[in-house]
Image (cartoon, coloured by chain):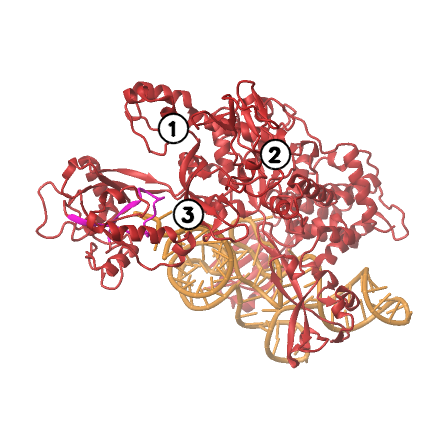
Amino acid sequence: MEYKFKEIEKKWQAYWNLHKVYQVKEEEGKPKCYVLDMFPYPSGAGLHVGHPLGYIASDIFARYMRLKGFNVLHPMGYDAYGLPAEQYAIQTGQHPEITTENNIKRYREQLDKMGFSFDWDREVQTCDPAYYHWTQWAFIQMFHSYYCYDLQQARPIGELIEAFRQTGSGNGLNVASGGHYSFTADEWNTMSRKKQEEVLLDYRLAYLGDTMVNWCPALGTVLANDEVVNGLSERGGYPVEQKIMRQWCLRVSAYAQRLLDGLETIDWTESLKETQRNWIGRSQGAELYFYLAGKGKEAEISFAVFTTRADTIYGVTFMVLAPESEWVDPVTTPEQQAEVNAYLIATKKKTERERIADRKVTGVFSGSHAINPVTNEEIPIWISDYVLAGYGTGAIMAVPGHDSRDYAFAKHFNLPIIPLIEGCDVSEESFDAKEGKMTNSPRKGKETPDGLILNGLEVKDAIARTQAYIEAKGLGKVKVNYRLRDAIFSRQRYWGEPFPVYYDADGLPQTLPENKLPLKLPAVDKFLPTKTGEPPLGHADLWAWDKANNRILETRCINNESVFPLERNTMPGFAGSSAYYLRYMDPHNPRELVSRKANRYWRNVDLYLGGTEHATGHLIYSRFWNKFLYDTGVVCEDEPFRKLINQGMIQGRSNFVYRINGTHTFVSLNLKENYEVTPLHVDVNIVNNDILNIEAFRNWNPEYKDAEFILEKGKYVCGWAIEKMSKSMFNVVNPDVIVEKFGADTLRLYEMFLGPLEQSKPWDTNGIDGVHRFLKKLWALFYAPGGSLQVNENQPANAELKSIHKLIKKVTYDIEHFSFNTSVSAFMICVNELSSLKCSKRMILEPLIVVLAPFAPHVAEELWHASGNDSSVCEAVWPTHNETYLKEDTFSYAVSFNGKTRFNIDLPAEASREEVEKAALSHENALKWTKGKRPKKVIVVPGKIINIVIE
RNA sequence: GCCCGGGUGGCGGAAUUGGUAGACGCGCUCGUUUCAGGUGCGAGUGUUUUUGCGAACGUGCAGGUUCGAGUCCUGUUCCGGGCACCA
């Protein structure tokens, strides 16, 4: 009987579906394992062969853990909100909901064909109101929370209000805020309610703030930092400008230290952790206060600057403010006003991209001077856009001798440069390295009795000395800065979660009552921003909150003072994906995001698989979101993803044909040098092992109907290149096509066989026959050529036992180390061995099927039943290997003299060290190398090497 | 510039602890099955040299440690990724 994969796969997919084989429930006492894939955005193009790579790997692991007796949660869903559906809607008027629904249907069809063991009863879709209910709910919780640095925890905002009432904003209150307000208890208590609300917004974890945002005019929306790459939007590549807008933000920065520390507790790759560390960007340094000259310490204006190089304080020759700094205005003298204004206007015009691309030194003198707090010297205050408003304090002390940017600025504007390290040369460039002995600190003759003396110290020690000095003298303080910014949470889009927020009579944001959730996305007739520049939800002009009657109005607005407008922005893409892994634990719960019981059982994700492109987006936001829910007691684990593996990308392998210029003749790859040719992309689906299917090519495009070919050895050989998988390069391979031709099991095995999971690699069908051949050979162990089942009850021989136990050991090891490619090799070796032994014994074949089942579940299920089992192979028990079968009777030793292997000898495995040594030396060939001398040393590695050292 | 990965045949890639480098698959060569093509089966396949046995060389490059190095150490170079006027 033939291996009819189509029938087999259809049959068992139906069986699994009918018997709900993969459905899971919490079972107290049974160990759990949560295996998760990053859920896909269902795009219109469908899945290509790159998508399933991670799904196959996680499915193998999930199936393995099930066979090992774990209760495995392995769900799948869709990240259904997104820009493409909305843009399609703008072009066609088709509602994004319909597009999304169709795409999901198509994705599901494709996924179903590959035999995944998902529990589809737990499916979530982020655009489903029953799902985004909990996205909105979490937002409300964040709105009503602030972050306390002392407790390292989010706390209810009520506690903060109480603290304000009693002690005001100062007095040791160590909480996260935008830092815009400072007040006493009395001031707080006499503030208007409106003012108090404004102040509180500066402390809430979800807050409305005027922040510098990445505004993308082409997309008509703001973007988060991780959505902007090199000053262009990640999606579409449009220019992005910096703009101050009033936007919803999440105070992710409050969690910077915990997000950093948490990395130490989780099993992620070092490179991914490093990426996150870079993104969080912790830097330890000091904040120093400079005063405006002429006013002394009583000056109203002091500038805090942040520096990691406090040791360079004696080399400060000027100060620089960011153009956006709030100090720019007060320090600008009347004489300089016009020049400064011109500069500010010029910088504002530049987009982020231009600012990066155009690194010309620009700047303007403010007219004022500042006092260096340590040296009491007067230094000029400049304004330049090389200082960023968003980092540190937006002001720097410039040390041109030891900072290349300050150096370039000083050279350009002819400002003094002081070298501070013994023997360094600053005539051509600055000396940025943090090494060497300090000098000029202070300069000769400038010493003061109780002053700071750094001369002779190593840089590292000088930093510590200076920091201690400024803290003791109250000139500044040791501080940690983070690069991590708060996440901008508003998007001017239609296809996203609405905010559960309305604006009261004072125009202040208020959250809806939780029992009114979910706040559903209203219907609109247009998906573009309104004529007045409002977000698309502005088209739903009747959509409002009727507070008095406790209801959402959608049709007719009763215009009285209890009706308030709802927020018109929607949430960004990462909102829905930040806590979806929690919802899978308890997907149908109408009362909670996740019940305490379900969460205590499933806890967090044991294995998370996905692409590395989410390193600074989803994987930061999710960790933040989870930590917040942990603080509020909703979830019991601080980190959401215990182990994470990034599967590599699958690139396309494009094929080329070579057309002789000006003709309709195509020349085969190795003959093309003799002609003037143009390479043309050809659809990889009509090329097999780089050999062009000429008939298919003629039919592929009418233009090539009459094409002529110059062949080599009767074949047309195509050229190839590795490129991104894309429609325009005709190198997209659809998994359906592979499943149709070879079956899902071959696809699964082949994707694993392609190479290490984490590595990017090109899709190359050249090797797929080999994997398919393996399945046919496996089949032949069960079925004789005539078609009869030949599984028998005979006792296995030693060689057969050895083969199968070697396989069990190898595959068990490989799965636990996610080295699936070598498992496939091991299967091939085992089946080859059993074939040549003509082994059809049940005692050998059954464990073979069980260990193969995670990789090729359909064929395993079929053979499992064929060999007489009634239950599903999914309910089998993972076999354990037995070392005794793996023991060798004899060891083959390589005998080396002075490290060079000269001959091999076979010895009984149980031979003692002395016997081995003796056998090696008395071997007939040994004399040739020992030349009769006594060996100095003999090294015996059991079973492997005998090395004889001769003087 | 700073920080992470990684360089092994014609190709994808093995080598778990420092112990016979190149498993397994593809490709290629020869044989066999077949009217023939495909398929199936068998043998071979790192490089150089040799009729052959064999020998020498061989994991980006240069050194080092070791009886022994793809693996450990130092330097260097190339490729991939992250961060970046971040003070």
Crowd band around label 2 with a 10 angstrom C-alpha radius: few (<14), some (14–19), many (20+): many
> Which kind of residue does numbered mark 1 sit on?
Glu
Q: Label 3 lies in what chain?
A: A
Crowd band around label 1 with a 10 angstrom C-alpha radius: few (<14), some (14–19), many (20+): some
**Residue A459 pos. (x, y %):** 24, 49
Tell me the quarter of the image containing the C terminus of chain A: bottom left
Among numbered discs 3 and 1, the one appearing first in the sequence: 1
Query: Mark 2 near mark 3, Cβ–Cβ under 8 Å?
Result: no
**Residue A439 pos. (x, y %):** 17, 53
**Residue A941 pos. (x, y %):** 55, 53
Among numbered discs 1 and 2, the one appearing first in the sequence: 2
- Residue A292 falls in which quadrant of the image? top left
In the image, the segment drawn in magenta is A378-399
Label 1's element? helix
> Which kind of residue does numbered mark 3 sit on?
Gln
The residue labelled by disc 3 is A242
Q: How many marks?
A: 3
Q: Is residue A335 visible?
A: yes
Question: Which numbered marker is on residue A34?
Answer: 2
With A79 as the anchor, is A434 left or right in this view?
left
